[in-house]
Amino acid sequence: MSNISSDLALFNDLAEILLREEENSPVADRIAADQLYDTIDLSLREAPMIDEEFKQAISNVLVSTPKTATSLFFNQLFGGRQGKAMVGDLLAVMLNNSMYTYKVAGPMVGIEQEIITQSCNMVGYGANSNGTFPTGGSMSNYMALVMARDAKDPDSRTVGMRKPLVIYTSKESHYSNAKNASFAGIGRNNIRYIPTDSVGRMDPQLLEIQILSDIEDGYIPTYVNATVGTTVLGAFDPVDQIADVTEKYNLWLHVDGAYCGGVLFSRKYKHLLAGISRSDSFSYNAHKMLGTPLTCSIILVKDKKHLHDSFSNDASYLYQTDGDDFNLGKTSFQCGRRNDAFKFWTLWKSVGTLGLEKIIDNQFDLADVARNYIRNNSDYTLYSYDDSISICFNYKAIDPMQLCTALYEHQITVVGFGSFQSDTFVRLVTINATNSTNDILNFFKVLEEFVEANPSLLATSEAVPALH
Ligand SMILES: *Cc1c(COP(=O)(O)O)cnc(C)c1O
């Protein structure tokens, strides 16, 4: 056997071990952080390791690593495993292209462009649109902000920021907005956080009032970051009404769909993005709702001129053949860039656009299952709303922080907590489309059994006010 063939055989053995482990203990054997280095041997040494020992060392790590693909992982805005996407990603690793030039990436360039073109069409952006695959939703927000800055103040690209630009987002938006304002030279203090309504959506009237007051004070309103699928509640900012404001005052409108922008693929839920074609840029993470492996993030720009203006730079050692349309490095942040498109393409190719729609619709169906269960059971209090796949609740008024931590430490299920206004609650995310109704009901069952077996948790209860 060649070396690679025997390495692949090793890979297959380890993958089998992992799959068996996921089945037998869907919540991994947890190692307390302060005992990590004493529990498994992670050390790197001078001497090589022989085959069996090497395999055992890897297998030890696999067993203890959190299992994000199983039906008991609800902690984050991703979960599950789409096999056809995984195949694409494993092959992308073997091919090991870099996406900057056609010379090195070949047809992968066309694959990336096909995804971008189809996505732009669904958004309704028109012939001048394009996009790229950044490293994630945080980077997508950053690229949008830089394009907005350069569009408002082109000189900032050469002489640096000299003008008092200000930007807007909601209180519930992603924390990358704060970091990005600092990176882009805008400054964290020059973000205006617009309050949300009672269901977590940015209030467009308060946005306009803030813009008018900033103009009055001599600031230059530049950019609005709207969120479709806020990180905690999964709320959708009203893009159409926000676009009325950004068009009136000539601000760049970016729509951050990292979490729930995938509703683009669902005829039933696309209305949650109403007005999206009026935005200047839109991003979504295929590694969240669409279930590809991390990371697969896409930013679309209505007028591709802005991507070129902000991100292209000549480099004669790199761009030697084939022209700008095929040399994607002209519009990316990175130089060497991982092929994140192929896994999304293998998934999309195999299930079709209709299959992607099913993935999205199933997440909302599972959310309905969870909400109905909660509404029909008086031991629960619900804090989130319909049309969201984040189901926020408390059980018997138990302190959600203590409940989530205990569930995790006892390897019952992995779920997180969040806050909105004055409430803190458990946040169950039904983003794993490979789950069934029974998996969701099982989540409540294991939670209830756990509380029954650990009555001391009830002592942490406080009267928790219900929203509805
Ligand atoms: C997850 C998320 C992001 C960040 O995306 P990463 O790929 O993790 O960087 C940004 N915005 C929202 C609304 C998100 O949910």
Image (cartoon, rainbow, N blue to C red):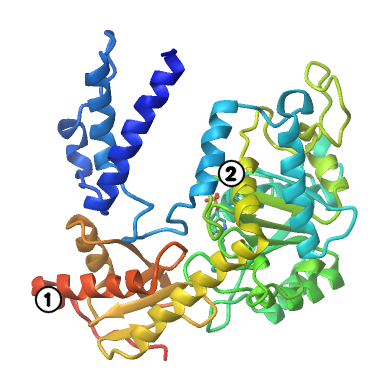
User: Is label 1 in contact with label 2 (beta carbons under 8 Å)?
Assistant: no
The kind of residue tagged 2 is Lys
Residue at (75%, 36%) from the top-left corner?
109
Q: Quadrant of the N terminus?
A: top left
Instruction: For label 1, count other residues whose C-alpha is less than 10 Å away and answer few (under 14), some (14-19) or many (20+).
Output: few
Q: Where is residue 464 in the image (x, y as percent from the top left)?
A: 30, 84
- Number of numbered callouts drawn: 2
Q: In which quarter of the image is the C terminus?
A: bottom left
Secondary structure under tag 1 reads helix
Secondary structure under tag 2 reads helix
- Left or right position of 353 against 200: right
Residue at (59%, 44%) from the top-left corner?
343
Residue 108 in view in this figure: yes
What mark, if any, has residue 223 been given in the picture? none
Q: Where is residue 133 in the image (x, y as percent from the top left)?
A: 67, 44
Residue at (59%, 50%) from the top-left corner?
347
1 or 2: mark nearer the eye: 2
Q: Where is residue 404 in the image (x, y as percent from the top left)?
A: 26, 64
What mark, if any, has residue 452 been given in the picture? 1
| Residue highlighted by disc 2 | 343
Quarter of the rendered image showing ligand 1: bottom right
Q: Where is residue 57 in the image (x, y as percent from the top left)?
A: 24, 26
Closer to the camera, 234 or 215?
234
> Measured along the vertical axis of the image, is residue 241 above or below residue 46?
below
